[in-house]
Amino acid sequence: MSSVTLKNITKSFKTVQAVKELSLDIQKGEFFTFLGPSGCGKTTTLRMIAGFYYPTTGSIFFGDREMTKVAPEKRNTGMVFQNYALFPHMTVYENVAFGLKVRKLASAEVKKRVEEALAKVRLNAFIKRQVSQLSGGQQQRVALARSLVIQPEILLLDEPLSNLDARLRDEMRTEILRLQRDYGITTIYVTHDQIEALSMSDRIAVFNAGECQQIGTPKEIYNEPANDFVASFIGETNLIPIQMEGREGEILQFSWEDDNNKRLMAEMPAAFSEEELLSVSIRPEAVEVYGEPPVNLQNVYEGTIELAQFTGASLNLFISLGGKVVQAMVLNTMAQPEPEPGDRVWVRLPESRVRVVPRVLEPKEGRRIS
């Protein structure tokens, strides 16, 4: 296995800059995810690491070896594509053995490695089966075995679960993570699915419009988003445009941009200028809902429940605060009576759970309170 370093990488296609001045370090054995919407540059970056594209500018290193212009077949990477790219006229064995035969390994060694790889993905019993006779999940396992059997330094996965149904996606998430831990291989995973990214990754790079917005662990990305795009793309959140009013020690005072009568207090780890456009982000599970006005608490607003959605483990409440709507998630405690549309409630946004973030989205973008 090997580390991967990108230094000031850009990639342009004629007049379109797909990746802009990207630098990052991926450690040996790390499960690193590129996360972002379609067209954000994550797959282009993966293809530059694989050697299918060369950067317009910048450098790529595997360990201390520069690989920027090295041909794909000389990089010792294994890649799993969105459509699996299996040979339908071949058996499972022949598909998995293909890369080894190209490398001209001895037949005995090919047989040994193929059988070991198929055992790892639990497909020993299907070794003579045509891949066209397999289910989607089984085909995905064959694709994984084919990539791992060559003993690559780096495993590259491009949206590998997008063609599977929800149940199979859950199953294959666990399977991929198990294989990655078993092999200890450096893995770079591309997805637009936040659940995949949060549940599988050691670290995540969040992409948008060709730029990396933030790099961090799943908890860092979710709990401390770098801006309103990251906050809105990773999980559900409430975004409120705000204006700075003042400061009391470590607590900052704000007013809601669209309602100066509403004040908000927030703990402030970072410094922002008064001219900077800001929003606060608070996750639905952090929003507190009361049936009576709470005493001696900050950031409390009276509202009315507009919609209540029962999801089994929780109840999602959409609460109107004078024309603005906040989403709150409360656990299903089987309490009676349950909150219903039309109920008068009081919403609290705890200072310790409010995150002040720079505003990079246009007003129509993201999931804002509106």
Image (tube, rainbow, N blue to C red):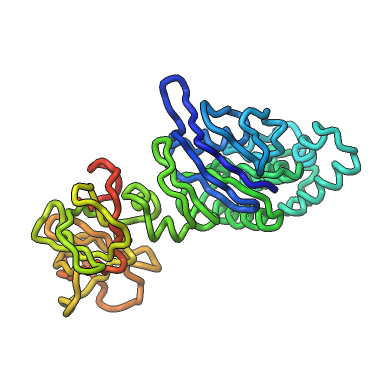
Q: Position of residue 328 (x, y in %)?
A: 28, 64
Q: Is residue 164 visible?
A: yes
Relative horizontal placement of residue 363, taking residue 120 as reference (left or right): left
Q: Is residue 309 visible?
A: no
261, 323: nearer the viewer: 261
Q: Position of residue 61 (x, y in %)?
A: 62, 39
Relative horizontal placement of residue 222, taking residue 61 as reference (left or right): left
Quadrant in the rendering for residue 309: bottom left
Q: Residue at x 45, y 61 (%)?
A: 219
For this orientation, the residue located farthest to the top is: 14
Classify 59 as above or below 266. above
Classify 167 as above or below 334. above
Q: Residue at x 47, y 57 (%)?
A: 218
Q: Position of residue 75 (x, y in %)?
A: 69, 35
Relative horizontal placement of residue 122, taking residue 342 as reference (left or right): right
Q: Residue at x 16, y 64 (%)?
A: 304
Quadrant in the rendering for residue 157: top right
Q: Count the marks: how many?
A: 0
Q: Residue at x 30, y 60 (%)?
A: 355
190, 50: nearer the viewer: 50
Q: Position of residue 241 (x, y in %)?
A: 21, 52
89, 254: nearer the viewer: 254
Classify 226 as above or below 364. below
